[in-house]
């Protein structure tokens, strides 16, 4: 590691992983991602909306950078991993859009209108 290396602003310790195989275990995740730095935590999605995704939290930012650089497009059980830095603003927008869609559907179902008359 170079002490004076300047990293892009989106780089952080949390890595968001998509396109995981259904049957991947935590041990396999630690084996794959642990090669690039010390891992603090791994969260694998289990419900319908989060299946095939995971969050990997590294001890330091350089481990996360190594993982993103080396594991994007990595083949695991005939699936190519999508490895990105976690970005709070992107995740919040997805949740907000889903909540907004759900609210609109409920308003239509029960005949409730929020438009001024």
Image: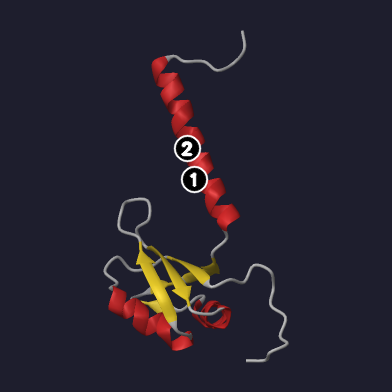
* Count of picture labels: 2
Q: Residue at x 36, y 80 (%)?
A: 30
**Circles 2 and 1: CB distance less than 8 Å?**
yes
Q: Residue at x 34, y 58 (%)?
A: 51
User: Toward which corner of the image does residue 38 lie, by quadrant?
Assistant: bottom left
Q: Give the residue at mark 1.
A: 95
Residue 25 picture location, percent across and down: 28, 73
Residue 78 picture location, percent across and down: 36, 75
Q: Residue at x 58, y 71 (%)?
A: 12
Left/right of residue 10 with respect to residue 112 in the rendered view? right
Of residues 56 and 102, the one nearer the viewer is 56
* Vertical arrangement, residue 33 with respect to residue 98, above or below: below
Q: Which mark is residue 99?
A: 2
Q: Quadrant of the C terminus?
A: top right
Give the residue furthest to the bottom: 1
Q: Residues within 10 Å of mark 2 (few under 14, many from 20)?
A: few
Say which element carries label 2: helix
Q: Residue at x 40, y 20 (%)?
A: 109
Q: Quadrant of the N terminus?
A: bottom right
Residue 89 picture location, percent across and down: 60, 53
Q: Residues within 10 Å of mark 1 (few under 14, many from 20)?
A: few
Of residues 39 and 107, the one nearer the viewer is 39
User: Toward which corner of the image does residue 75 lie, by quadrant?
Assistant: bottom left
Left/right of residue 48 with respect to residue 85 in the rendered view? left
């Amino acid at each position: 590691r170079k002490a004076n290396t300047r990293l892009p602003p989106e780089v952080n310790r949390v890595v968001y992983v998509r396109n995981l195989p259904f049957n991947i275990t935590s041990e396999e995740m630690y084996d794959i991602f642990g090669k690039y730095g010390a891992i603090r935590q791994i969260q694998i999605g289990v419900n319908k909306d989060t299946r095939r995704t995971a969050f990997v939290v590294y001890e330091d930012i350089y481990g996360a950078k190594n993982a993103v650089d080396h594991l994007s497009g990595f083949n695991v059980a005939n699936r190519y991993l999508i490895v990105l830095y976690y970005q709070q603003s992107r995740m919040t927008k997805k949740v907000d859009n889903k909540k907004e869609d759900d609210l609109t559907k409920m308003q239509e179902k029960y005949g409730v209108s929020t438009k001024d008359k």
